[in-house]
Image (cartoon, grey):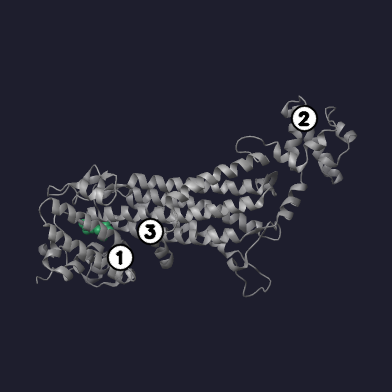
Amino acid sequence: MTEPPAKMWSGRFRSAPHPIFDQWQKSIRFDWQLIDEEVLASKAHALMLEDAGILTHDERERIGHALDIIADNYSERQADIGNDRQAEDIHHFVELRLTEAIGELGLKLHTGRSRNEQIATDLRLYIEFRCRMLLVYLGKWIEQLLVQAKTAGDAVMPAYTHLQRAEPVLVAHWLLAYVEMLLRDASRLEDCMKRLNFCPLGSGAVAGATLALDRTIAARELHFTAPTANSMDATSDRDFVLEYLNALTLLALHASRFAEEITLFATAEFGFVDLPEEFSTGSSAMPQKKNPDLTELVRGKVGRIHGAAESVTLLLKGLPLAYNKDLQETQEPLFAASMEALKMLLVLPPFTRALTFRTDRMRAACETGFLNAMAAATYLVHKGIPFRKAHEKIGNAVRYCIERGCELGDLSLEELRQFGSEFDTDFFAAVTLEATLDCHDVIGGTARSRVHAALVETQQRVDALAAKYGPVGHEQEAAHARA
Ligand code: ARG
């Protein structure tokens, strides 16, 4: 059996690479994570070679079979690949194992292809798979937010602007706000999958394969929409990596806002939520503490995920066409951010399910502080007063109440009439908590009937998402175990 050369490119060189440089430039330390994608893409390439008459049917089958065995052999210990001493990268690794298994035939696989197209293909497959997996867990988190929203019923809480109490809303309305954000994050991931779904195989190193390969065969085999349209673009752009990382950044930002609110609401000052003990930690110094480490970490993860998007942005800037080794630097941030996002989405659904809201405290917070002032001004508008004037009159009444330590609804009709002759006995019904909620009777408003309808409508969108990306398959379970 012919020994494969130690390097994939040693023919032209008189001296071996400096060992320090050699170790440093290798990507096998991290691109072992692409083993499954590399095997899939290699099998698709073999099909094109068979079609072009470079491989016989039998040879192609032997290659395909050997590639499957390689993937299987490492399925439980993929990280071990990273310690391989000889392989330069995952493409080389698979070639080495293949040649060990089937001899010279293994070397034939690298006919008419370049690692430049291979890495571009592997990364697209990797991201597509991650998007699907993240969509499964994002769907689970959204589902738990919806369960909480339904459980909350007509419970109320203050909505804040400038972190000052503004108007009452249904707790469900607040939770549905996060559902909207996360559904947009889901659609961003889906969008990302659409644009990256073109197959670089057959693009060669830069100018296209030097064999007359039918590129549609590989595209079809790997479930891509079509072959990529331009070989220089296909081998050298990583916009799809950045798009994905930006989508993860937005997802992490939304998660951080939720995490921040839960952190605040769990303080003694707010007391709106009880942190579940199984998701909290204690202090080694202060025996009384129950700390919101989970939400603090979620808040903190944005830094790493956005950091990954930042790194990729910077390394793509000004890169001349086409492939440059700089592109290898996209991988570590990509893998790290994917893993962080996945781990975060594994912990958020059970955490959200375990939250208990102190609806008594939330309601009490709505009952003082003039959260019905807008509703009161609206009452005057219905009596024909321009809103600007109504605002002024209610403002005066609020000042009067502050001096007396009472709320608008506590004033007598006589007292109210100091601020306007339009006040009547129906004022008191117009400023109750329920009336205050229900006067926001517009699409997207917090009137109880609107929120009830929104819950039904949102559930339909969430079900549609789950139907596309759930239930969790065995691949997801495997990722779960690895994370
Ligand atoms: N490890 C390389 C990367 O991640 C694969 C492509 C290498 N191509 C090359 N011409 N050196 O980008």
Circle 2: is it few (<14), some (14-19), or many (20+) Cα within 10 Å? many
Residue 88 image label: none
Q: Position of 240 compared to 155: left or right?
A: left
Q: Which is more toward the observer, 228 or 329?
A: 228
Label 2: which residue? Answer: 380
Q: Is residue 53 above or below residue 87?
A: above
Residue placed at 47% from the left, 62% from the top?
343
Q: Earlier in the sequence, mark 3 or mark 2?
A: 3
Q: Position of 143 compared to 452: left or right?
A: left
Q: Amino acid at mark 3?
A: Pro
User: Residue 442: where, in percent of width, then height?
Assistant: 63, 34
Q: Which is more toward the observer, 144 or 339?
A: 144
Q: Position of 383 compared to 335: left or right?
A: right
Q: Quadrant of residue 334?
A: bottom left
Q: Earlier in the sequence, mark 3 or mark 1?
A: 1
Label 3: which residue? Answer: 333
Dividing the image into 4 quarters, which one contains the N terminus?
A: bottom left
Label 1: which residue? Answer: 32
User: Residue 381: where, in percent of width, then height?
Assistant: 74, 28
Q: Amino acid at mark 1?
A: Trp
Cα gap from disc 1 to disc 2, whole angstroms: 69 Å
Cα gap from disc 3 to disc 1, whole angstroms: 14 Å
Cα gap from disc 3 to disc 2, whole angstroms: 57 Å
Dividing the image into 4 quarters, which one contains the C terminus?
A: bottom left
Q: Which numbered disc, 3 or 1, marks the residue closer to the eye? A: 1
Q: Is residue 326 visible?
A: no
Q: Are marks 3 and 2 in contact (CB under 8 Å)?
A: no
Residue placed at 74% from the left, 55% from the top?
360
Q: Secondary structure at mark 1?
A: helix
User: Residue 392: where, in percent of width, then height?
Assistant: 77, 32
Q: Is residue 95 visible?
A: yes
